[in-house]
């Protein structure tokens, strides 16, 4: 009897141990599968479709490719170039951190040279700086090398380019990353900004110098356009363009502006800004579409959470990646572009004409980089295509 009970107890122990082993194995397998899914990061193609303002009639859809935060990476370059060749966008926009401060720039230059060859060569390519380009200490060289590769660098010295695509007058605007105020004209860091994360200096740059700088850029450029000869603008002249470099090569993507005795239509304005969190500043600017990066999608994406952390936004960033709608100033005909930049006029007009409020769109790319030291979690890199269509 004792022997029978002893055997039963041994069998129960073995069965229990077997169940524990099975459950442990299943748990390990589940963790392994979850980890693979979390770290699996193929390049995604993300699409957004936007309606052009009613006054802008496009003869065909206009496609913009948004490339951000490559960080000199080579891993996805073939896929990126293949996606671009398959779509042949009208514009390529690159809002910063395409080049890294800690990774060799060799692969980045290979990518930009590929953009300047064969089928992609005639697509206008626009770039603004990110923080990592400044941190490299080679921002002057980087901008010069990009220009040599056919990229149009937008900054305070040349903040705007005019395009006419499919009958739509488009202005591409661009601003340097706020770190521009931490470096001198030679690309060396200023003494007062020697600490990369000096909070007091950072707040001063972001809240004062950068905001004042971007508003000054728009005010000066709009005043220049206002005083330009309308006949030159109607004939497609570059008189309103602040970039002193040679004009873009003509191609299928760039149409000549039609001659007309009528006043030119208000342009569709696109702003490239590396950082997306300056929404309160963006609201005051006379632009229709803002294209940004910088966030890397919040690095970690969880169910019902767009991102876990983004630089300059912190935990659970509001603008980690995707499409956002921003309320803008009224575009009542009695209010000029310069009035829109003035917050008091903007607020007064908004109170008087709330039904005329026009929205802006902010699109934030989750980036193109892959860093095994700081992996993406449920957050694959992406190339973004934005299609602008007539209403």
Image (cartoon, helix red, strand yellow):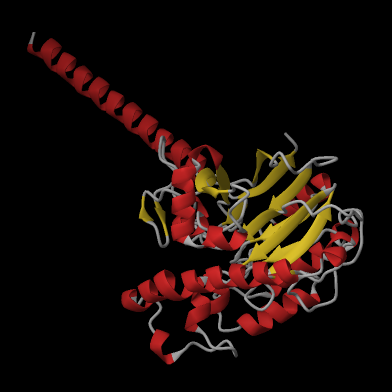
Query: What residue is shown at x 58% (from left), y 72% (from top)?
Result: 176
Q: Name the quadrant of the N terminus.
A: top left
Q: Is residue 240 left or right of residue 13?
A: right
**Who is closer to the viewer here, 154 or 43?**
154
Query: What residue is shown at x 38% (from left), y 37% (from top)?
Result: 28
Q: Is residue 105 above or below residue 53?
A: below
Rendered location of residue 366, percent (x, y): 55, 51
Q: How many marks?
A: 0
Is residue 278 visible in the rendered structure shown here?
no
Q: Is residue 247 above or below residue 92?
A: below
**Who is closer to the viewer here, 359 or 99?**
359
Is residue 376 visible in the rendered structure shown here?
yes
Rendered location of residue 347, percent (x, y): 44, 52
Q: Quadrant of residue 113?
A: bottom right
**Who is closer to the viewer here, 149 or 161?**
161
Q: Is residue 218 left or right of residue 148?
A: left
**Who is closer to the viewer here, 191 or 309?**
191
Query: What residue is shown at x 52% (from left), y 49% (from top)?
Result: 328
Q: Is residue 11 left or right of residue 366?
A: left
Rendered location of residue 253, percent (x, y): 86, 54
Q: Residue furthest top?
A: 1
Rendered location of residue 127, percent (x, y): 68, 66
Q: Is residue 12 above or below residue 145?
A: above
Q: Name the quadrant of the C terminus.
A: top right
Q: Is residue 5 above or below residue 84?
A: above
């Amino acid at each position: 009897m004792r022997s029978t009970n002893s055997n039963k107890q041994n069998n129960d122990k073995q069965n229990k141990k077997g169940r524990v082993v099975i459950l442990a194995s299943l748990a390990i397998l589940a963790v392994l599968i979850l980890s693979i899914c979390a770290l699996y990061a193929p390049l995604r193609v993300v699409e957004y479709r936007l309606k052009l303002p009613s006054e802008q009639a496009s003869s065909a859809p206009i496609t913009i490719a948004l490339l951000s935060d490559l960080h000199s990476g080579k891993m996805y370059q073939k896929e990126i170039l293949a996606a671009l060749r398959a779509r042949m966008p009208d514009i390529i926009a690159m809002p910063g951190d395409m080049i890294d401060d800690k990774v060799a720039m060799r692969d980045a230059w290979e990518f930009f040279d590929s953009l300047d060859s064969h089928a992609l060569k005639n697509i206008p390519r626009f770039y603004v700086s990110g923080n990592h380009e400044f941190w490299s200490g080679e921002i002057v060289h980087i901008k010069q090398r990009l220009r040599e590769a056919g990229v149009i660098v937008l900054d305070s010295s040349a903040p705007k380019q005019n395009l006419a695509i499919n009958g739509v007058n488009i202005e591409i605007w661009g601003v340097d990353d706020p770190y521009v105020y931490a470096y001198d004209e030679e690309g060396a860091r200023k003494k007062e900004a020697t600490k990369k994360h000096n909070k007091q200096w950072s707040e001063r740059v972001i809240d004062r110098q950068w905001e004042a700088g971007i508003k000054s850029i728009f005010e000066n450029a709009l005043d220049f356009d206002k005083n330009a000869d309308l006949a030159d603008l109607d004939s497609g002249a570059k008189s309103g363009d602040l970039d002193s470099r040679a004009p873009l090569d003509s191609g299928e993507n760039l149409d000549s502006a039609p001659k007309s005795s009528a006043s030119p239509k208000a342009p569709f304005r696109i702003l490239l800004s590396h950082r997306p969190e300056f929404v309160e500043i963006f609201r005051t600017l006379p632009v229709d579409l803002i294209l940004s990066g910088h966030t890397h999608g919040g690095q970690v994406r969880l169910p019902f959470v767009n991102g876990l952390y983004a630089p300059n936004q912190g935990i659970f960033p509001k603008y980690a990646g995707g499409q956002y709608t921003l309320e803008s100033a009224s575009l009542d005909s009695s209010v000029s572009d310069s009035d829109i930049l003035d917050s008091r006029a903007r607020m007064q007009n908004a109170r008087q004409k709330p039904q005329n409020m026009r929205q802006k769109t902010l699109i934030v790319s989750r980036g193109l980089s892959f860093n095994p030291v700081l992996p993406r979690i449920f957050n694959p890199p992406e190339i973004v295509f934005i299609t602008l269509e007539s209403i």
